[in-house]
Structures are given as structure tokens and as C-alpha cells.
Image (cartoon, grey):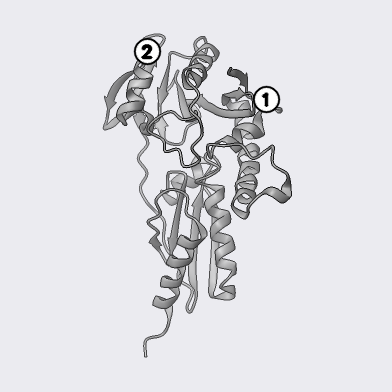
Amino acid sequence: MIEIKPLTEDTMMAEACCGSGYCLLAKKPEELTDQERTILRAAEVKVAWLKKMIPKGLSAQIAYAEDGPVGFIEYMPIEVSNFYKGKDLYIVNCMVAPHTPPFPDPLQTKRIPGCGSALVQAMIQDVKDKCKGIVTPLGFGYTPDMKGFFTKLGFEEFENQGLKMLIKRFAPVELPSPVHLEEKYKYEPVPGKVVVDVFWSSICQIVGPFTLFNVREVCKEFGDKVIVNDICIDDREVQVKYGIAGWSKVFFNGKPAEFWGPPEKVQIREVLKKALEEEKPKE
């Protein structure tokens, strides 16, 4: 049995914790692993961002099963998005349901039939009188299973200025277009040091704050050999200043790290060791 609850002070932390595909709220502090503690710290950052964005129109629906929260869908007016240009539309920021394909299920969470559909329907009911349509993000629209999932709920695909997404129209509306940023980031070297520039966003707690916290902790292991610059790109002005978009991007001495998903400490450590080796004076 699934119950859908709106985003409130009471459900906010549940959404922030469910971004990783499971909820840690029921665990006692002593039961948490280091990684889970980091996830909870990241969730607190996400909660602060949610509180900031709610007055701008952000909302969410959270799915609960017998054992607690199991998924959510988060959405906001496209006018406050950093990634798309448009008006009279809502954009889906993120959706987690156990376990709507194509997302992997490393924890072997039992799939709950109807959970994803219930979340989308609750979102539709919430915004249908506030806008002319809803747009899904790129990742949802252009994997075959998710495209089929949203199509069953009345979404259709579109392409505009190279932007391929899915939209559910409530009324005739102008299609959104992408935001293009000119990269202005410049690496500022410090002799004898490795400079790590971390660009991160609160919009995804696992990719953004989780990455930041892991990078910070690994860099501490190397003491004063490493300088960490922490740049939050939640605000559009900061994104434009550096020309950096997305949820997180990490540079080691000006070179972007090629992480697949949120990096674990072992991955960060390997990249940092390589950067330190390259920084050593040549004999």
C-alpha cells in the first residue's frame, strides 16, 4: 500500500534521504556507516536548499510504504531553473521510485508496482492549474524504459534547439530551450601544491554535497600539499561567472576529473595521488 504525501517540514528530510534509493532515518547513529553519515550530512544541505526554493515554487511528492519513505518526485517552475529557458512550465528535477527502470538496484530493493505512477499523478494534480505543462529532464526522457513510462502518463517527446525532452501539455505552450554557458573557469596554480576546485550544487544531495564532503575528507589526508576551493553553483550568477553548469564538477590542477556518478573516496584518492606525483619536481 502506497501513500503519497506532499513536501512539508515533516517530509522534507525523507525526500533528502531517499535520493540514494533508500532511507537512513530509521537507523540509530551507531548503526550508520561512514558513507551513510556522509549521505545524511548531504541530505541536510539538500533540506536547506529545499527551504530556500519552496517560496520560489518548488514542491515534491513523497511516497511512503509500510516501512517508511520509499521514493519521491521533485519539481519546480522552469523560470527558476539554471539549465533551461522557458515559461509557464514546471520542470521535474528528480524522481526516485523503487525501482523504476532504468535505474540500477544495488540494494535489491523490492519493486513497488504503481509507486512511480502514483508520484507522477500526484505531481500532475498539484500543478495542472498552475502552468501549461510539465517537462521531464533529459535522463528520464531518453532511456527507452523511462520514455515508455512517461508516455503512458500522457507525456510526448519534443526537440527544440537541440534539447530533447518529454512534455505533458495542459494548454498550448512555447517549448523550452537549453541554457548555453561559455566556460570561464581558469585554474590558478599554487607552486608546490595541488589545487582542487570543487563546483557543486545542492539540487542533488548525492552528486553535489556528497561529492564535496568526500573530496574534502580525502584532501585532508594529504595536509598542506592540497588546497581545496569550494564553489557552490546553486545561483545562476555563479554559474554564469564560471561557465560551469551541472550538479558537480571537480578539477585537479585545472584538469576535470572523469568520475562516473558520485565519487567514492578511493576514486578521489587515486586521482589526487596522480596529481601529486605530477606536481613533484623533475630530477
Residue 69 lies left or right of residue 151; in this view the side is right
Element assignment for label 2: loop
Q: Amino acid at mark 2?
A: Gly
What residue is shown at x 63% (from left), y 43% (from top)?
A: 45
What residue is shown at x 39% (from left), y 15% (from top)?
A: 168
Alpha carbon distance from label 2 to label 1: 27 Å
- Residue furthest to the bottom in view is 283
**Image location of residue 2, percent across then percent down:** 58, 18
**Image location of residue 140, percent across then percent down:** 38, 29
What residue is shown at x 37% (from left), y 51% (from top)?
A: 183
Q: What residue did someone put label 2 on?
A: 154
Q: Amino acid at mark 1?
A: Thr
Quadrant where the image shows the N terminus = top right
Q: What residue did someone put label 1 on?
A: 8
Q: Quadrant of residue 218?
A: bottom right
Quadrant where the image shows the C terminus = bottom left
